[in-house]
Each structure stands twice: as structure tokens, then as C-alpha cells.
Amino acid sequence: MYQFLIADDEILIRKGTLKKIEKLDLAIQCAFEAGNGKEALTYLEANPVDFVITDIDMPEYDGVQFLDYLKKHFPEMPIIVISGYQNFSYLQKAIQANAINYILKPFSREDIQKSLLDVIAILENNKSKKNNENEVIISTIIGHQTELGMKALQKMIPSPNQYYLVLSVCRDPKDSLERLTQSAIFSEPIPKYELTRFSIVEKSKIMDLISGLPESTFLGISSPVMEATAFGSYYQNCIDALNSRKYDSQPTLFYYDSTIINEKYSFPHISELMYYLETGKESVLKEKLREYFETAYFSEGATLFDLKDIGLSLIEKSKQFLDDYYRMQSNYTYPEIHQEVMERLFTFMDISTYFLEFLGNIAKSMSYENLYSSQDIIANVKDYLDIHYADPITLDFLSDIFYINSSYLSTLFKEKTGMKYVDYLNGLRIDAAKTLLQTTNRRAATISRIVGYDNEKYFYRVFKKFTDLTPEQYRKQK
């Protein structure tokens, strides 16, 4: 019987939720009812529970603070968030706390049942694997080294240089898993990703493993393992090998080769895609991103790493935009997202689907904000520049996204603002540079790049034009 805590300041809703749960007849039991986050925290400090159901909007120590506490002190605990608000910042906070689900009030019996079944499945899985030595070994391989894991690996591999670490992605696992099991001395799926597996294979059996594998299976093969205690670096070999895959790559296996350095893929559409995200154009964003990904991968020779790098750049820029727009400093889970993308997704379809859904959800949430929707085109342009002054923005780009001839836009901008477009943009950048010079110790060369100037000498010229001072003189004077 699993124990849970429920936190909600509205007693009728809390009791109603418990009544719905009781009727489901699941192997769970309410250990404590809290009227706010503070009561819940006090109970948890003295009493263990298996999972938590919590509201967001509560008095005193509210749900947002409570989620921060849970993430810090109980990072593995399943959480179900219930809220009466369809608020992006609340949803983001729930995601950051690794909540299993975010349920909007009023909710149905089916809604709470699905979430609870998900929680029970997670708890059952954790329980069955708690003392599993294979899980300890996997944890050690991916970098969470423990003494127990090291001993298990050294026991398994007495002569390390005779083995390879293999990371396999099995899209049609029936035959692949059987072959992996037969050839490997160790073969286990990565937690939460059953089709992606670690295998440790003897050098003499690597060709047996490779021969006859279906085309739906891809193998990333490390350098020969030289020391069992250094498996973390060999794991990265496998990741790098699989991420180097291109559409026209013929074999299903990819050996790590430290001598190969791929040139960075040039992707000129970041600003365009961010515009669709910010303006809430979910369908356009998805359509364009899918189109650009397909062109890059199937026509222009981009690697899986290139696609991941593009998608992660968009996610990071969206994080910066949301933090600035909502004026908040979020505990953004970018490192976890980066790890999941780089170490778990190894097919074009998986990568494309992940970014389309992730970025599409953000665009959908922004559709309620009506950004850049003024009837005055110049007002929209100025709003855009206020946010993106540090980007390489051209009049041609602005004319494309706001559907206006670039020459006319230039004329209209000067007419409405009394300034040339380039002078207005430089003014925004120099204002930002002045703030950084006053509030940080960063070098002027660094600040020039931050505010949008690739050419440091040009930045100095523009800065002096606007202030009659060099950046160093301005900093000393202020």
C-alpha cells in the first residue's frame, strides 16, 4: 500500500478529490491532508510518503514554493499537480519539479485515475529495481560513479582492454535484443528508454553482434575499454558515434573516431522560428521547423548532432525570451533537457517529434499574449527590436516577418521615429552596453558581443559616437 500526501487549501475540493480516489480502489492510502505548503512541509520533515498530490495556488507557503522544496529534498518523488489556473509559469514550475501530471480543475475521475496509475507504475518500477546490481552498473557507466558500481564492473570485466561498450538503438527490438543478449556479457536498457540499451561486448564477439543485425538497429561503439573504472568517457564515445549519423550513412554501426571533426552546420533560420514561437503561431512554427529539419538532414548532409544543436539552441533562446518577457528567474531544466536529447534520441523521427512538440507547446502558450499585434507596424518593429536588439537583425528580415517592403519600412521607420533604423538599433545596443559597463566587470570586448557587435572596433566607434567616450572612459566616469 503506497502512502500519499494531499495539499489543497480548499477543503471541499480536497475532500472531493479524496472521495474520487477512494472509489478507484487502488493500492494507495492518504497519509496526511495539508491546507497549505507549510503544513505539508512540516509533515514531510518527520514522515515519509511515496508521492504527493498538491494544488499550486495556496496561502502562506504556496504550491510554487512547495514544489521547489520537493525538487530539492525529494527529487525522485512522483508529484501530481492540481490547479485551477491554465498558467504557463505554473505549468513550467510543475515540469521543473518533475511532476507526473498537471491537472486542471475541475477534473474527472478518469483524469485522476490516469495520473495515479502512472504514479503507481513508477513506484512499482522503482521498487523492483531498487537493489538491482545492473541498475548500479548502468548508473556508473553514465557517470554517477559509486564504489558499489565500480566493484561490480571490475568483477564483471577483469581484462578491460578486451571489451567494447556498445550503445544500441533498436527500433524493431525482437531480433536485435536476442542477438545483443547472446553476444554481450552485460546488456540492459537505459531507464525509461527500453529501446536504447547498454551492452558490454567482448572484442572477439563484436563481429558476431554486428553481422545480421536488422537495418532498424543502430550501434554506437566505443574505443576499446582500457579501464573499467573509466566507463563514463567510453559512454560518451558511444553517444558521439551515434550523433555523427547522417541520412546517407550506409552501415548501422558507428565507431567512435576522435580524429574526425565535423564542421559546424550553418542554420540561418533561428530568428525566423523564434518569431513564430513568440507570436504564438504554433502550426507555422511546426511546419517550418519540420521543413528545415528535413532539408538539413535529407538534402544537406547534417548529422543528428546538428539537428539536436539547432533544437537545443531554440529551446535555450526560448528560455531566455520567457524569462525576460515574464520577468522571472526560473529554475529551468535545460541541463536535463540537453542530456535527454543528446543521450537518448538517436533517430530523425524521435528528434524531430521531440522538438516539434516541445517548441510547439511554448508557441501555443504564447498565442494568448498577442505579441507584435498592434495595428501600427512601426510599434511592432520597435517591440521586436527591444527584445532582439542583440541578434543580427536586418531590414530585409523585418520586412519579411511583418509583410512590408523593406524600402518602405525604412522610410516609414524614419518618419514615425525621427531616426534611421540602424541608428535606433545602435541606440538600443549602446544603452545595453552602458548598463553592463556600470553593473558588471566584463571586458568591453565581451560586452560588444553580448549586445550584438561581432566587430569590436566597430563597437568602439559606435559607442564613442553615442557617448563621446570610449567604453573604458565611460566605466571610470560612472
Image (spheres, rainbow, N blue to C red):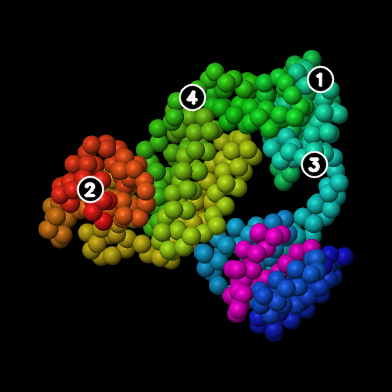
* Residue at position x 72%, y 46% in the image: 192
* Residue at position x 69%, y 80% in the image: 35
Q: Nearer the viewer, mark 4 or mark 2?
A: 2
* Residue at position x 76%, y 73% in the image: 43
Is residue 57 located in the magenta-colored stretch of the structure? yes
Up-down relation of residue 150 to residue 357 (above or below): above
Distance between the alpha carbons at the discs numbered 4 and 3: 34 Å
Residue type for callout 2: Gln
Distance between the alpha carbons at the discs numbered 1 and 3: 22 Å
Marked residue nearer the N-terminal end (1 or 4)? 1
Residue tagged 3: 135
Residue 159's label in the rendered image is 1
Q: Residues within 10 Å of mark 4 (few under 14, many from 20)?
A: few
Marked residue nearer the N-terminal end (2 or 1)? 1
Residue furthest out toward the bottom? 12
Residue type for callout 4: Asn
Q: Which residues are magenta?
A: 50-74
Marked residue nearer the N-terminal end (1 or 3)? 3
